[in-house]
Every structure is written in C-alpha cells, then in structure tokens.
Amino acid sequence: MAASKPVSALSHPEAKVKENSLPAILIDLALLFLSAFLFAFSFPSGISTWGLFPLGFIALVPLFILVHRSNWISIFIYGLLFGFASYSIFNFWLVRFHPLAIFIVPTIYALFFLLLLPLLKLADVLFPKKGYLVQLTIWIGYEYLKTTGFLGYPYGIMGYTQYLFRPLIGISSITGVWGVSFLVIAPSVFLGNALKRGTEEVRAFFRENKTAIIIYTALFAGSLLFGFIGKVDLKDPPSLKVALVQHNVDPWKNDYEESLRLLTRLSEEAMKRSPELVVWPETAFIPAIEYHTKHRTNKEAYRLVKELTEYLEAQNVPFVIGNDDGVLKRLGGTERIDYNASLLFDKGTFRQKYRKTHLVPFTEHFPFQKQLPGIHKLLLEADTHFWEKGDEYTVFQTDKVAFSTPICFEDCFGYLSREFVQNGAELIVNMSNDLWSHSIPSEMQHMAMSVFRAVENRRSVVRSTNGGITCTIDPNGKITSLIDPFIESYLVSDVPVYTETTTLYTRWGDWFGKGAVYCGVALLIFGLVLRRFRNRKGSKENHD
C-alpha cells in the first residue's frame, strides 16, 4: 500500500480541517484579514507614509487562497467582510471627511466584493488549471468598472501602489494605470492558485505553468525596459515658473477675511521669485466673485470680493483661483446654484472659468433626491454641501502656457486629464482641498494618483493644496519638489512644459481596462457553455 501524502491545512477540499468547522473558519478569517491589511499597507498608510509598494505584488495572495477554500455560501459572506474590512483600514481617514463617509464607502465595497468574490470563485471552478488567468482578467475589469458611474471611486487600484517605482509605471503611457495593475496583481493571483491545495503541490503547479511564468517575466522585464528607454527627454523643453500657494486653512470655517490675508501674504512672498503663474487651491476664496459683483446684497461678501479683485488688478502675473461660482438658477429669480470652480485672472481681468465636472458622490453630488429622499435628507442634515456639475473641459490660455485644472478628486480619474490634454492642455494644474483629513496618508494616497496623470499623458502636473501635498511632478512621474503638509507655505518651481509626445493612452484612453471587462465576461460565458456541453456529453455517454 502506498504511503499517504501529508495534507496542508490550507488545502481544500482534501484538508484535514473539515469545511465549515471552527478551525476552518478561523483559518479563512485569518486569510481574509491578512489580505485586507496587506492591501491597505501597500498604499500610503499609518504604517508607512510613502506606502510599502513591494507588498502590492503579494497583498492578494491570501484572498485568492480563500476564494478556492470557500464554498458557495461562505464566499458571499467573505466578500462582504473583505470589502468592508479592507476599505475601513485603507480609507480610515474618511471618518474626518464626512460623518457618513466611513460607513458609506466600506459598505459600497462590501457590496462590490459580494459580487466580485463569487465571480473569482466561478473562474476557479470553471477553469481548474488556468483559472488564475481568468481571475486576473476579472480583477482588472473590476478595477476599471469601479471608477465609472455615480459611484466611481479610484482609491484602491493596485497599480497606484507603484507610484514610486518609476521604471514600472512608464507603461501607463500605453495602458493607463490598468497595465501596471495587471503586472502587480498577477503574482498574487498566480501564487494564490499555486498554494490553494497546499504547499506540497506548489512545485508541480510551477512546472505545469512555467510558460505563464516565462511570459510574465518577459512582460515585466519589457515594461521595465520601456520605463527606462521610453521616458521623455526633459533637457530642452521650455519651462514655466509656477507659484503654488498652500495657506493651511479650511475654507469652510467661515473666516474668509483671514484666509484672504494669508493667501495674499503668501502670494506676495512667492512673487519675489518672479513666477509666471500663481495658483491658489480649491475653494481658497469662498465668496462667489462673479455673483457678489453682480448682486451686492451681502455687503460683507462684496467687500471681500472687491478687496480681492483690487489686489488682482495690481498684479502682472496670471492667477488661477479656486472659488465657489454661484449663479441664479433663473433670470430674475432668487434661487442660487453653485459650482466648484477655478477662475483665471490675467493682469487683473477675469478671463476664463472651469466648473468641476466629476463630483464626489454623496458629499458633493446626489442625483437621486426623488428616488431616495430619506438618504438625501440624511445627507443634508449632516451639513453636506452639494454642487452643480460643470459640462465643459476648459483649457486656460495665458501668454506662456495652456493648462487645465482638474479640481481635487478629479485628478484621480485618468479620463479627465486625458480629455484636457486632447483639448490642448500643455500643463495639468490640480487644485485640492484635503485639509479636512488631518491625515498625511490621505494626502499621499491622493498625490500618488496624480503621478499617473503625468505619465499617462507625458505632461507635467502641479498641485496647489490648502493642506498638502503641494508638489510638482514631471512627465516621467518624478516628484521634483514638494512642501510639507499642514503648514502655511508656498512652492515656486520651474516646471517643464513638454508637449512633444502624444501617448497611446492620450489617443486610446482606457482601452486596457475596458478590454479586461469584455474579456472577463466572454471567458466566464465560454466556461459556462463549455461546462454545460461537457455535462451533456457525459450524461449522454452514461446513458448509452
């Protein structure tokens, strides 16, 4: 009689630990929470301000082991639990953003993973040998889909963990962040499947899938090579000296006069270094400049607006200012609507405006007032400030440069900066209000996504924030200068205005992410049809 092989506690269903027994459930939960923590710590976090980006390559290994171990009932429960746990740890700073945010975001991701984990399980069942390839495709498709629609939220895309790994992120100029995610997630999917039946079968799994290992190694090495040879030459392009103001004031605390004093004082100090553009952060000045100039019913607001405009008239440098752009909903009416806007003043004259087009769900925009009146009321009672959506992708024009201003959350979405560049933007100027978070990891997570906007389009990105991270990023994704968060300061920097390259991402957009969606759906349908065909064939043979 042949000796029986030892069985790992991680194997399934052959494991000695019975399915659904307390020890099995404890192992499952350990895998789930281990993956949740590794996921969160791959990004900037309380453990590491800059993030532990190597963890990104293995963060999901325990989760993919769990997918295989779970049965069809527990996989839904674990999906809910992983989504809620991972985003509660990763986005812990949301508790300061809005009283409801720390519940809303993790709950949404609990629902997302309620759907995602069973799809990963289905891929594992339908494709016992090569299911990891299908799982990888499904995950990339999920990352793309989660950035779309009303609930679009790009935090947590695994590719963003690599923002410091410049040779690797160069491929985002072709694939967007999705290609980087592909290379980051692939090891987790592969190792999770290698370990799913226990450590004793890992060698056999590697032997059976050596072609996939070779292909991945070639893709990874090719991406690094492209990152080295594909970076743009920044020795000769013209530069623009930009002053980025960080006044460290929460604009919604209603001390508008003190805020204006700080903004002008810091600007005056920065002007001594002869900048060619001065940038104030998102809603740095709250009283609506155009509205209070036309409608002078609020004397205090008009006094501050007049003081600001007189200051700007004395300047010879263009200023771009974050402002609450209020307008009357109807001519002759009294109802006012507001846009989160950026305004360009050149030599004291108002030139152009941009109104934020992609608003933060629930806390800036909620279009379901009639369908969900209870939630709408709850949001209003929590002091939510809703904005109207803009509909134009403005490119500001000065004598020196053409630029666009994604406002705060907008620089997290690749499609927006791509749209601006296609319209002629030579520089991307992000204006953010992140002071509310009181969290450096929150600031860093946001800034990390801006790095990809630079590389995707090969355009410089500058960020003026009221609290952090105020910085400059060159077209190769290098953070060239920054100032500490949560201090009153300014940054004056020479920024390369590079326009020689139109990247494949700028031309084609999110083709890689969309392709993953279509391929994932097609593969699952193919697997289901093939399984049904085999079952019918086997049934017929048994009958014969």
Image (tube, rainbow, N blue to C red):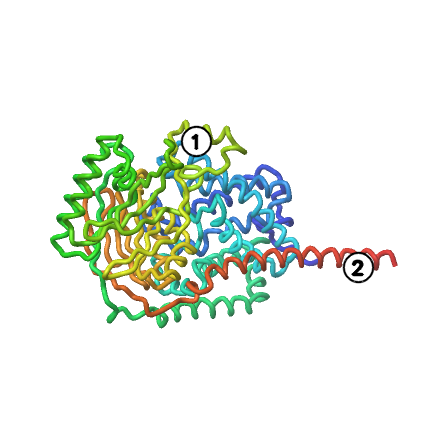
Number of marks in the rendered image: 2
Please tell me whether residue 65 is drawn above or below residue 326 in the rendered image: below
Out of 536 and 102, give the one closest to the viewer.
102
116 sits left or right of 234 in the view: right
The quarter of the displayed image where residue 75 is located: top right
The span from disc 1 to disc 2 (Cα, nearest Å) is: 56 Å
Please tell me which of labels 1 and 2 falls first in the chain.
1
Q: Residue 366, image x and y in percent?
A: 46, 37
Q: Which residue is mark 2?
A: 537
In the picture, the quarter occupied by the N terminus is: bottom right
Q: Amino acid at mark 2?
A: Lys
Does residue 148 lie above or below 302 as drawn?
below
x%, y% of residue 96?
35, 35
The local secondary structure at tag 1 comes to: helix
- Can you see residue 244? no
User: Which residue position is annotated with label 1?
Assistant: 379
Q: Residue at x 60, y 41 (%)?
A: 74
Which residue is depicted at the point 63% across and 42% down?
Answer: 18
Which residue is situated farthest in the left direction here? 272
Nearer the observer, 216 or 20: 216
Quarter of the rendering occupied by the C terminus:
bottom right
